[in-house]
Image: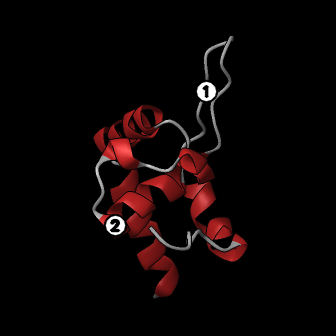
Amino acid sequence: MGERIGLTDEEWALIGPLLPAEHGRSCRPAQDNRRHFEGMMWLARTGAQWRHLPDDDGKWNSVFRRYRRWLEVGVFDAMLESLAEMVE
C-alpha cells in the first residue's frame, strides 16, 4: 500500500495526552496508544477493512475494540474540541 505515514513526535505530544490510559489484564499489558491510534488513522486514510490493518499497528481486533471503546465514551469528540481550542 505504499509508504507508511505516522504521526510526528510533535503531533503525538499534542494528541497523546488527550487519549485515555489503557489498562491491560495482569497477564497481558495494554499496548501503546500511539500504535493503535496510528492504526485507526491508517484505516481512515485508506478506507481499508479492519482485517487488512498492517501488523505494525497491532492486531486488528485489538485496535477495533479500543476504537469502539473510545467512540462510545466520546474520546474523539473531546479530542476534537480540545484541539480546536488550541488553534483559537
Q: Residue at x 36, y 69 (%)?
A: 45
Kindly indicate the quadrant of the structure image that contains residue 17: bottom right
- Above or below residue 79? Residue 54 is above
Question: In what quadrant of the picture does the C terminus appear?
Answer: bottom left
Q: Is residue 10 above or below residue 37?
A: below
Q: Please tell me how many numbered marks the rendered image carries.
A: 2
Q: CA distance from mark 1 to mark 2?
A: 29 Å
Question: Residue, x 39% and y 33% (percent of image)?
Answer: 65
Q: Is residue 27 left or right of residue 58?
A: right
Q: Which residue is mark 1?
A: 23
User: Looking at the image, is mark 1 or mark 2 nearer the viewer?
Assistant: 2
Of 41 and 2, which appears nearest the observer? 2
Report the residue that reaches farthest toward the bottom: 88
* Between discs 1 and 2, the one toward the N terminus: 1
What is the quadrant of the N terminus in the image?
bottom left
Three-letter code for the amino acid on which mark 1 is drawn: His
Quadrant of the image occupied by residue 5: bottom right
Q: Which mark is residue 46?
A: 2
Between residues 21 and 29, which one lies in front from this camera angle? 29
Q: Residues within 10 Å of mark 2 (few under 14, many from 20)?
A: few
Q: Measured along the vertical axis of the image, is residue 70 above or below residue 28?
A: below
